[in-house]
Image (cartoon, rainbow, N blue to C red):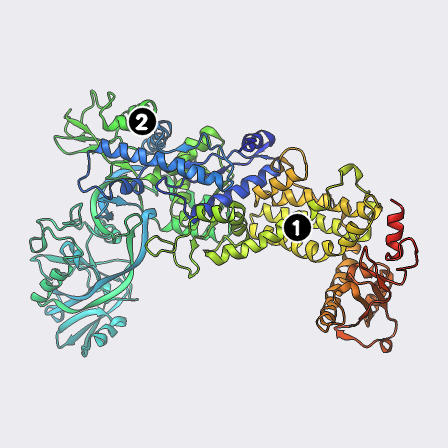
Amino acid sequence: KEEDIYHKLITKGKKDYILHDGPPYANGELHIGHALNKILKDITVRYRALSGCRTPFIPGWDCHGMPIEHKVTENIKELPPRMDVRRLCKKYAEKYVNIQREQFIRLGVLGDWENPYLTYDKKYEADVLRVFKSLLDDGYIYRERRPIHWCIKCRTALAEAEIEYKEHTSPSIYVRFPVNSSDDKLLQDASFLVWTTTPWTLPANVALALGRDIDYSLVDTEKGKFILATTRLSVLDEMGLSYKKLANIYGNKLEGILAHHPFFDRESLVILADFVSTEEGTGVVHIAPGHGYEDYLVGKEYGLPILSPVDDEGKFTEEVDEVAGKVVFSANDELIALLEKNRNLIDSGLVTHSYPHCWRCGNPLVFRATPQWFVKVDHNDLRARCVSAVDKIEWIPGWSRERMRDTLVSRPDWCISRQRNWGVPIPALHCEECGNVFLDSNIVEKAIQLLDNEGSDAWFEGKGDINDEKICPECGSRKLRRGEDILDVWFESSSSFVAVVEKRLALPADLYLEAVDQHRGWFQLSLILSMATKEEPSFTSCLTHGLVLDIQKKKMSKKLGNVMSPQVIVKQFGADILRLYFASVDYTRDIEFGEESIEATTLSYRKIRNTFRYILGNLFDFDKSQSVTYEKLLSTDRYVLSTLQQLIERVKKAYDEFDFHRVYSLLFNYCNITLSRFYFDILKDRLYTYGASSPERRSAQTVLYELLRTLSVMFAPIIPFTTEEVWRKAGLSGSVHLQDFPIGNKNLINKALIGKWEKLTAIREKVLLPLEVARRDELIGNSLEAKVRIFARDADEIKLLRNMEDILPSVFIVSQVEVVSKESDISGMEIGELLIEVKRAEGDKCARCWIHSDTVGENSAHPTLCSKCVEIVTSK
């Protein structure tokens, strides 16, 4: 932030790469899921910038809607006037935008934090209505009384994206619907047997649905004659009812029969429906078009009335005298008693099943018929065009393509109206004479201009000449008032492709990146709106990540006390630890996160940091101008430089494919195994005992310098604070984040050399085992006190050892190595095709390099040094 890295980045690149930020809610401090999401986005943005792209990243916040209104009003007994609620909501949203902004910055997320997009901004609100007007003008918007999910606590309609399915215990009852009229005498004293888990919907029953091709049985029991699916006769056994089968009838033969309602004096029509199943229940489905979407659709087909005797608070209206004023769920017991009184309750119990709940307050929902505004998803072949567009988008991971396709194929029309205070108004007009509610394109355009100039408060405050000279199209009245419904917040956030991407960036965005639940939320709804208004998707790639769970794979929640705050983690461990953890896991799955996760990552981070410390500590007297040419590098150094080029190619491929845990694995293993366990270990003698400017030491430093520059840049998207610190301590110019991502030099990849050294390092690993045994048996104190004798049965291995015999002591970190020609000349530990013998090293210990050598004491001026060290100290 000090050097304004972000603005330098977006002027550095040539080709645009646009990752469009899906807006989090401004309704509290960041949780660990926010951290995962923004860190993945930041890794992507930083990598693309290093790769030469211009990467404008405009963060945003969802500032309207139920989450914020719920927080503001949850402790208020009496709801204040609308405008007071709106002012409180805006103040609350502003507070948490500022808090979250600082927390995101502390995580190291780069972006245009001074100019984010906020959905309560008047320009953004106007753009939302522009999208709405486009849909209206093209015939997508309609109003209808139909059943929708309704939260009785929040008192508003909910869309599919706002529903959570959780376990819920409901009554499980079997109900008798007596046959009222039938031409078949056999059926005249029979009843249809119905199973339901929602007794509260029975007052709205108007029909019974059967499957056209399902085989039904008429059976006689001690409780009367029943009609139910033949394959479901087992339910009678479960009730303890013995039965005698009287007849079999297919469902299509029963269509049109009238049954008697189980406690009202009215009839229920027997109809046919494709959704009737015999997997559970009785194969006879109770139909209440006012309380179910499938019921509503089949009801339209048969012209059935829509009854919904439930008010906004979830209470029965006066239409149901027996339970009027009672909340539907608490009325279940009384309705069951009413069934029993009428001798139509056959059996009852409880069942625990998956049931829709409000995403915000967590309460179970009801289905009730109310007048709402909808987007018709099949108009102009919109659904089909969206499904077709799915195949043109890159989905990461690949399986998410099918998930999106399935979501689109099965979704109903989109309910976009909400009965709340805090949001963008639907600019409809209500006729006070006839009750007609309507939309007019010219009125919507006036509303757009009003919001563009003054914001959405102006609509509710009655400002502007919105309905002047307008008359009701139904009755001609001029007594019109403005509608009070607001748009679904998902409509607002999904309009960001116009308000942000089109206006401030460029359509389409290269990437949308959000959690898996956005398939039915922001991903899907953005696609629907962009296909409806632009006839193309608003994004070309879509990346999905899993949810963050606790260590027991449970969803984190304050109620369970298992929430881990990213702010606490960052304060204790630093942002790079958290970033490294999320880079190290497979984000395509749900992630189990706990203290153990951070502790393990801290150990990994220390190894990476120690890698940089080792390199920095050995470059204090080195300048790039002192680099040794490739041809003059020692074999070990050329090998490491070759593997570095391979690493660059593999890491770049993994970054390109968003395979961040592969990036982490490649880089960490290289630091931990190739460098720390092998290269750094065998370099110590050269770096610490050879002359400061000796060719051997400069050869090592040349490669260390390349390692420093290359690893810093490759690690930079993941651990930006650490790599910037390394870059500065190395005295390198500029910022690590403004560099170009390294390109592997294929000319430096010597596969023969790599193959030779890989074989030798494999042999080295085997040699370390008998050395450890010798140390344990106190034959030696450290490896430099050892001489290793080695024999290989494999001809290629013995040839390799012979050719490299002069450098084997430095590779094995011992004082002497003898390659034995005959197996009979060695008695040692057998490891595979190798025989390895460890003995005490010959000669005395050099006081300077600690290597044992027969040459120690040969020079009278330096009696404690070996010949190598004598040469070094006398040449200074």
Q: Residue 455 bears which disc, if any?
A: 2
What's under tag 1, amino acid-wise? Thr
Compare residues 512 and 585 and report the one nearer the observer.
Answer: 585
Q: Give the answer, above or below, for where 831 lies relative to 628.
A: below
Displayed quadrant of residue 804: bottom right
**Which residue is tagged 1?**
611
Q: Secondary structure at mark 1?
A: helix
Count of marks placed on residues? 2
Q: Residues within 10 Å of mark 1 (few under 14, many from 20)?
A: many
Question: Residue 161, percent across and down?
Answer: 34, 47
Question: Residue 338, percent across and down?
Answer: 9, 62
Which mark lies nearer to you, 2 or 1? 1
Q: Give the answer, above or below, for where 325 lies relative to 795.
A: above
- From mark 2 to mark 1, how far is it between C-alphas? 55 Å
Question: Residue 309, percent across and down?
Answer: 14, 49
- Can residue 869 be seen here? yes
Asked if residue 827 lies left or right of residue 302, the reply is: right
Q: Residue at x 72, y 53 (%)?
A: 680
Q: Give the answer, above or below, for where 404 lies relative to 769.
A: above
Q: Give the answer, above or below, for where 753 lies relative to 46.
A: below
- Can residue 392 be seen here? no
Q: Secondary structure at mark 2?
A: loop
Displayed quadrant of residue 761: bottom right
Compare residues 700 and 334 and report the one nearer the observer.
Answer: 700
Q: Residue at x 44, y 60 (%)?
A: 551
Question: Residue 17, percent across and down?
Answer: 55, 36
Asked if residue 10 lies left or right of residue 141, the reply is: right
What's under tag 2, amino acid-wise? Gly
Q: Residue 743 bears which disc, if any?
A: none
